[in-house]
Every structure is written in C-alpha cells, then in structure tokens.
Amino acid sequence: MYILNMKNSKFIIDKFAKLIEQGLVSSKDLTTELFNILKSKRDEFVFKMKLTSKDEFEVLSFLIFLTLYFLHEIL
C-alpha cells in the first residue's frame, strides 16, 4: 500500500514539476492543472474499483427488490 501511495505521489510531483518547468507560474493556471490531475486520478481510481453510478445503483437495487419480492411470493 505504501509503495502505491509513493507511486501516486511521485506521479503528482512529476506533473507539478513539469508545469513549473514549462513556465506556468500563474497560481490560477497551477491550481487548474492540479485540479485536473487530481480529477483524472480520481476517475482512474473509480474505474479500477468498478463502482456504479447512483442511477445504476438505484436500478440494480430495484431489480434485487423485485427478485426478492417474486421469490417471497413463490415460496
């Protein structure tokens, strides 16, 4: 786990260093780029976890409810 965190930290630090090297010295530009990097990492994490959206969760919950209801009716 520690190695994974170090890898992610290194990735963010490398991206931040590249921005500074390219001359993006405006704090607004740096903030925008940092948020974009963090959002992409979040999206990557969510994709790896195979999480569902709220809409998908509600549909799946309803399908499970219907399945249990019909099973209860049969038994």
Image (cartoon, rainbow, N blue to C red):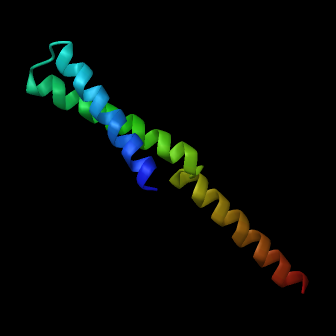
Q: How many marks?
A: 0
Residue in view at x 22 percent, y 20 percent: 19
Give coordinates of residue 4: x percent, y percent: 45, 48
- Relative to the observer, which residue lies in front, 31 or 10? 10
Q: Could you tell whether 11 is left or right of 24 in the image?
A: right
Where 44 falls versus 24 (above or below)? below
Residue, far bottom: 75
Residue in view at x 33 percent, y 32 percent: 37
Residue in view at x 17 percent, y 20 percent: 20
Residue 42, picture quadrant: top left
Instruction: Name the quadrant of the C terminus.
Output: bottom right
Where 35 falls versus 22 (above or below)? below
Residue, far front: 3
- Relative to the observer, which residue lies in front, 74 or 27? 27
Give coordinates of residue 8: x percent, y percent: 39, 41
Q: Could you tell whether 51 is left or right of 38 in the image?
A: right
- Relative to the observer, which residue lies in front, 1 or 37? 1
Give coordinates of residue 2: x percent, y percent: 41, 54
Residue, far left: 26
Residue, far right: 74
Give coordinates of residue 46: x percent, y percent: 50, 47
Q: Could you tell whether 48 is left or right of 68 in the image?
A: left
Residue in view at x 72 percent, y 68 percent: 64
Q: Could you tell whether 66 is left or right of 4 in the image?
A: right
Where 32 falls versus 71 (above or below)? above
Residue 38, picture quadrant: top left
